Image (cartoon, grey):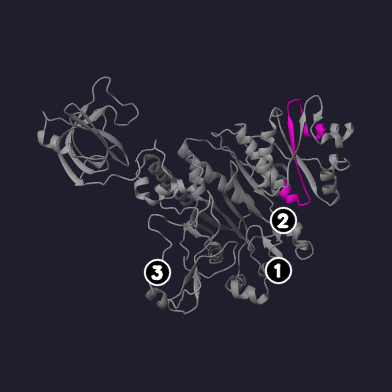
Amino acid sequence: MLRTHTCGELMLTDNKKAAILCGWVLSRRDHGGLIFIDLRDRYGITQVVFDPKHNKDSHQKAEHISREDVIQIKGKVRPRGKGLENPKLKTGEIEVIVDELNMLNKSKTPPLEIDDNKNVSDDMRLKYRYLDLRRPHMQANLLLRHKIIKKVRDYFDKLNFIEVETPILAKSTPEGARDYLVPSRLHSGKFYALPQSPQLFKQLLMLAGFDRYLQIAKCFRDEDLRADRQPEFTQIDIEMSFIDEEDIYKIGEEMIKEVFTLLGVKVKTPFKRMPYVEAMDKYGIDKPDLRFGIELINVTNEVKDAEFSVFKDTVASGGRVKCINATGCASWSRNDIDSLIEFVKQHGAKGLAWMKMEDKLTSSITKFFNDKQLQKIAQKTNAKKGDILLFIADHKHHIVDVALGHLRLHIAKKLNLINEKEYNFLWVVDFPLVEYDEDQGRHVSVHHPFTSPKYDDLKYLETDPKRVRSKAYDLVLNGTEIGGGSIRIHDRKIQERVFTLLGLSKEESLDKFGFLLNAFEYGAPPHGGMAFGVDRLAALMSGNESIREVIAFPKNKAAVSLMEEAPSDVSKGQLKELHIKVDFV
């Protein structure tokens, strides 16, 4: 080894011990003959001292050292001296007086500061990711990610789960997002697809008798990106046979409990559960943040007879009127309210009406309401003096819920209502099996096509699909979905009925999923599972909004890796081997 100790290891108890350290030069300070260097590796920082009276040769070499040079030093540990300690460092009580300095590699002036306290643009960080990853907080993020995965593996190993790797090159099957396709050199015109999830393979493993499966799985989806999405991501994937939802809830909660010991946090179980319908009705979103109050209030009945045409016409057309009570915010200016109007328009609403509670409800629209109607609204919303009610009306119920749901979160942030130190877990359950996609003109799965309907609702599958609930569940942490899953269909006839509902012909079902349908005829056990997002979980636990902060080499919002410039052109020879001609780009 080129070193005897790391830069985060030496303590006062090592006084007078000989040490060899290797690392990067974080900083160099010349104090009237003495040269001090902070030497850094991923374990910490150690101050090393070059004294011409102690060793002239090493001191002369130290005069030519620059930031990020890679060096090796040999010397002895000594106390820094009273009043010279650095309590911010693990090694802050000692320094190493250098006997010998060896230059291992010179560094050019880095294009970004290797310092957590310096702001650097996202593009620069991604272009020079290998430098960005030297920053202490980035190394701490990846270390936490490593520990999360280790905890998970140890936890499931004790429960007799077996880790099985599933294929990366597989068949393209419709699973919600676009596939990343890989052309075959040996089979002209045919393609593999990178897996959006190991879903079908883990179900087949249940049929094969592996009743407890685990995988730290790489998944790929070609979809629009945002802070919590990447084209490739990692999930903790589990599946079990001969179980029901209660088994998944218990095993998932205990896994989370184990993982959060890494933060010294005691997670209380069981987690609260909330039906999907209630989540949408009260919070306008299927992953509500429950760290603060503010609920959506349905005032459709209270406003339906008013002369305010926006509300009256909406209700008459079968629409809905809902509001939220921003308590104590009646002092908001017209500019404040106008900014909220623009905000909800970004989420599909046509506008935003409001009433302030003074001695009674007042606004430019209250003249269209009689006193009894205003009294009913105030009573339904529990409006007190100083509050402001914010209304959205639309004939599409979904728009009302979603726009108000986003407004609820926006206001909570604006008013600092969110306790950032709280971890609030929630199971959202009883999702609809399907929803109608107007653009595609057909029903689509809310989760995926292999999710089991609730057996009590099977009678509505062909006649009234919107009434069919599924055995699906999502785990939500602080308003972010960190996991989801379902009990799967294990009966071929039910699976074929669901495929038909989704608009797949018998021929299409056999072409896309024939191997699964055939497997169901050889003794398929009842089974189910879920997947937890490693990236989202690590981001939340490390206090980061973006999952890019916990992924070593992420893509930017355009799905481009700026460091190696991928995606990139390939040679004509490679395209020819793959029987591909690029003639329309």
On the image, the x and y values in percent for residue 133 come to 37, 46
Instruction: Classify mark 1: residues with Cα within 10 Å, few (<14), some (14-19) or many (20+).
Output: some
Q: Is residue 423 above or below residue 123?
A: above
Classify residue 511 as left or right of residue 146.
right
Q: Residue at x 56, y 45 (%)?
A: 253
On the image, the x and y values in percent for residue 350 come to 73, 47
Q: Which mark is residue 161?
A: none
Q: Is residue 450 magenta?
A: no
Residue type at the position of mark 3: Val
Cα distance in 3D space between marks 1 and 3: 44 Å
Disc number lying in front (3 or 2): 3
Reading the image, the residue beneath label 3 is 570
Q: Secondary structure at mark 3?
A: loop
Q: Is residue 5 above or below residue 252?
A: above
Cα distance in 3D space between marks 3 and 2: 48 Å
Q: Is residue 383 magenta?
A: yes
Q: Kindly indicate the quadrant of the structure image that contains residue 381.
A: top right
Residue type at the position of mark 1: Arg
Reading the image, the residue beneath label 1 is 497
Asked whether 16 or 85 is in front, the reply is 85
Q: Earlier in the sequence, mark 1 or mark 3?
A: 1
Residue type at the position of mark 2: Arg
On the image, the x and y values in percent for residue 98 come to 16, 34
Q: Earlier in the sequence, mark 2 or mark 1?
A: 2
Q: Is residue 58 above or below residue 346?
A: above
Reading the image, the residue beneath label 2 is 469
Residue extent of the magenta highlight: 377-400
Disc number lying in front (1 or 3): 3
Classify residue 146 as left or right of residue 455.
left
Q: Are marks 3 and 2 in contact (CB under 8 Å)?
A: no
